[in-house]
Amino acid sequence: MINPIALSGSYSEQMDVVCQASEGILYQQRGTLIRIRDNQIDTLTATSLQSHLIDHMTPVTQKLTKDGDVIEVPQKKFERDLCQHLIDRTQIDLQELEYVYRCPVFDEDMVVYSEHGYHPTCKAWLNTKDLGFIEPMPIPEAKGLLDDLLCDFPFADEASRTNAMMALITPFIRPAVGLMPLFLITAPSEGSGKTLLAEIVGMISDGVHAEKMIAPSNDDEWRKRISSSLADSPSVIIIDNVEDLDAPSLAAALTSKIWTDRILGSTKNMSVPNRAVWFATGNNPTVSAEMSRRCVPIRLVPATERPADRPFRHTDIERYVIENRTQLVRAAMSLVYHWVMAGKPLVDVTMGSYQVWATIAASVICSHGYTGALDNRASLRTDEDDELRAFIEIWAKNPQARKCATARDLESMCRDDDGDWLASVRGSSLHTGARSRRVSAYIAGKVDRIYGCWKICRSQDSHSKAVTFYLESLK
């Protein structure tokens, strides 16, 4: 018999016995019963729980013989009803498991974990068996390995190269940083190495190719694919060949530590931790204003008409990464480790909701001589932002409208000697009133936003209830 456990009494008492005997066999994730299977998190059903338990323990029940003796009788399987009760139980006395990592990681206190198996302090399962014992290497050796790895990528500027180095170390600090922005790798043409660069981060952190998805055509499909991807605890997710990066569900995922969605074909919801490192690639994609503030740009600009035909130092870089993965893991981990040992010196960077990640990642990389972290984020400013800024400059030149502008005033200012502004907002209606209402609604959505030295403000007459707008100078 495998690990016999005596089951008697009520289902509640039997469940307590099973939970006590299940350390290292069963875990919970936000109240959901899970297990580690093929080094991934697997949500259990009553049927799979029956099979999983019988592989690790034997249920034993007590029976009374004809002579009045009590004997223990091994059972072939656990009762299905008992397994279903365990799954439905709201209070589960099991260890909490949030995510699976496939490389050494640093927690919020910057303590490093590298041993294969479950780590209760950071609530993580580390699949590092293939890496063996990982120890830091000297910084010159670590930088040499990583610089050599990236030498074939034609970074447009120093900021893009530094941001790529930040991407390399991000899987190692992922438990420490909470929210994560999206690394947006762009180029003017195909064959520049965009997807390959993202793949390399995944192969170093995971040892296998990262999960890729093609950008869906609608937001509902975005939501479904995000849910499906996060359910498998991926270290890296790549959204490939993006043309128009504008997805409310993706924007929500990038500002959610826990992703919640309805289970397909069910009325129940799933809630899973979002600890992935997100990438998107595209040839000069358009980026919405909502997404631009959630992105870290990495720009590749090959100096040749046919980028895929250019000579490479690493002719088969994927094979090189797989064969040298342990050393590359050591190199990336070493950059973080030596920064911690140096007292965690900080650099001054700003990135809104992603401030913790930006501060740690930029500080680690810049402490080792790299420069320009996040300096190219202004390149993601959208055409819409540029057009609105231009319109506000026109608005600010009108002293009367600057103090009080009606909807008709705003629509009128869109048409002046310098250009035709906000045409897509105003629409093609021949009626001035319809165009004015659309411009007014658009500007109302920008109230309290700051553009340059001007803040858009709104006022409403207490009697007529008429709404007007004005610009507040911040000089």
Image (tube, rainbow, N blue to C red):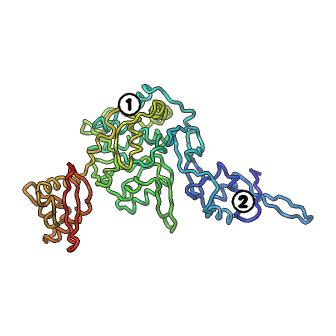
Residues under numbered marks 1 and 2 in contact, where contact means CB atoms less than 8 Å apart:
no
In the image, residue 97 lies at what x, y percent?
A: 57, 50
Cα–Cα gap, marks 1 and 2? 56 Å
Q: How many marks?
A: 2
In screen coordinates, is 136 left or right of 363?
A: right
The residue positioned 33% from the left and 38% from the top of the image is 373
Q: Is residue 271 left or right of residue 199?
A: right
Q: Residue furthest bottom?
A: 464
Tag on residue 77?
2
Tell me if I can see residue 381 in this picture.
Answer: yes
Tell us which disc is closer to us: 1 or 2.
Answer: 1
Looking at the rendered structure, the secondary structure element under dot 2 is loop
Percent x, y for residue 417?
7, 56
Residue 10 location, x and y as percent? Answer: 73, 65
Disc 1 target residue: 147
Q: Determine crowd level at label 2: few under 14, some 14-19, many 20+ residues with C-alpha closer than 10 A.
A: some
Which x, y percent locates residue 70? 87, 61
Left or right side of 311 for 416: left
Query: Is residue 316 at all visible to an observer of this figure?
Result: no
**Type of amino acid under label 2:** Lys
Query: Element under label 1?
Result: helix
Q: Residues within 10 Å of mark 1 (few under 14, many from 20)?
A: few
* Residue at image coords 52%, 38%: 111
Answer with the quarter of the image where residue 66 lies.
Answer: bottom right
Mark 1 or mark 2, earlier in chain: 2
The one nearer the camera, 271 or 79, is 271
Q: Residue at x 34, y 44 (%)?
A: 350
Looking at the image, which is closer to me, 337 or 302? Answer: 337
Which residue reaches farthest front? 462
**172 lies above or below 414:** above
Q: Residue furthest right?
A: 67
